[in-house]
Amino acid sequence: MCGRTACGLEPEQLCHACQRRTKESGGVSDAVWRDHPPLYQVRSTAFVANYNLCPMQFGPVLVSGDQPCLRQKTSEIEPFSSADRVVMPMMWGIVPGYCTNKTLADLKLKPINARIEGLLGGKSNGPFSTALNKKQRCVVVADGFYEWKGEKPKVPYLFYPKQSCSVKLWEPEDETVDDDGKWTGRQLLKMAGIFDCTLLAGEERSLFSYAVVTVASADWFKNTHERMPAILDTDEAVDRWLDINVSSAEALRLLKPYQVELGSHQVDRKFVSDVRCHSNDCVRPSADVTPIKSPQDKKMKQKKFGTPPKKNLFAYFKRQPASDVNDNLPPMKMAKKEEED
């Protein structure tokens, strides 16, 4: 967890949705979009709306304009001030900054999640060590994330911030900014993350990659998974997490299990399970909703009927008294049994 996300907004809409209030004027300030520099080893580093974002793909990430690694020379980039929030596509699956003598294909381990317990431990040589030491923290923005739950076969659910009745995640956003420039569209899920920039072998520019920070699940989510993403639900929390003047240890102490239950609905397995499918069908509520059986239901069934061995069903019936075996026979076989007796 978390292994799939959805984001159906285009870059311009993401900049509006990631705006923050300015203390001086009381207005709002949009985030600034920055394209990821092109790389030889990646077919495309551009971001387009993707309702089924998988690891190794490029997803939108919010960072502080104060980050020194954003000052690299790249073409086709507009200048931004250090006070800006910057939205930039990065590859999901962090590549440590010390892997400068390897190609992307050489790297077998690209963690997509970072457990907060490991980050608090502060391993000096772990895959997140460079990012932590340089305070390279980011906010992963998305419409929501997918999680599979229930007994096998598990069914996928989409978890997202609760929206107003007029907002449908599977419908495209139209005019979503009011006269004052405030974003009026869907509320994005903001998850704490860490990122790194790595100059791979054979490349002229760095690869930016990220991982989502996970914490122990809140009570309302434990039936789905034991881990959940660390969610930042206020502008103050986002600013504090992104602030490079805040130490990593202090910033990590801000992250707690999210106690407010998210909205959720079942989605169609055939769309979400196909990594080639990126359409809004992935987030559309499933027409065929499969009821989820709880572990208590399974225990009650076993208590009532017993649990027959998987390999030797004959031995299971042989152990029962004759009356119990006869009771389990179909009517026709029961009559034949009585004739033989």
Image (cartoon, rainbow, N blue to C red):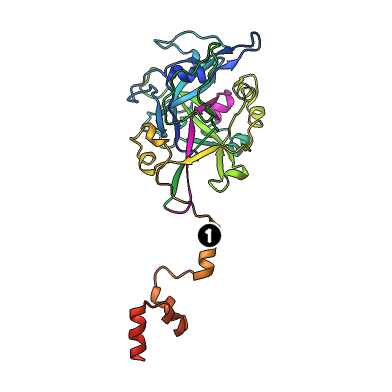
Report helix, strand or loop for mark 1.
helix
Image quarter (top left, top right, bottom left or bottom right) of the C terminus: bottom left
Pick whichever, 69 or 47, lies toward us: 47
**Magenta span:** 129-152
**Residue 259 point in image, percent of width and height:** 63, 38
Residue reaching furthest to the front: 166
Give the quadrant of residue 78.
Answer: top left
Q: Residue at x 39, y 42 (%)?
A: 268
**Could you tell me the amino acid type at mark 1?**
Asp
Q: Residue at x 33, y 90 (%)?
A: 340
Q: Is residue 150 above or below residue 237?
A: below
The answer to whether residue 56 of the structure is visible from this angle is no
Pick whichever, 305 or 178, lies toward us: 178
Residue 130 is inside the magenta segment: yes
10 Å neighbourhood of mark 1: few (<14), some, or many (≥20)? few
Give the quadrant of residue 90.
Answer: top left
Residue 109 is inside the magenta segment: no
**Residue 103 point in image, percent of width and height:** 37, 28
Q: Residue at x 44, y 70 (%)?
A: 309
Q: Is residue 48 above or below residue 326?
A: above
The answer to whether residue 174 of the structure is visible from this angle is yes
Q: Is residue 172 left or right of residue 136?
A: left
Q: Check disc 1 and report the residue beneath it.
A: 297
**Residue 24 point in image, percent of width and height:** 65, 9
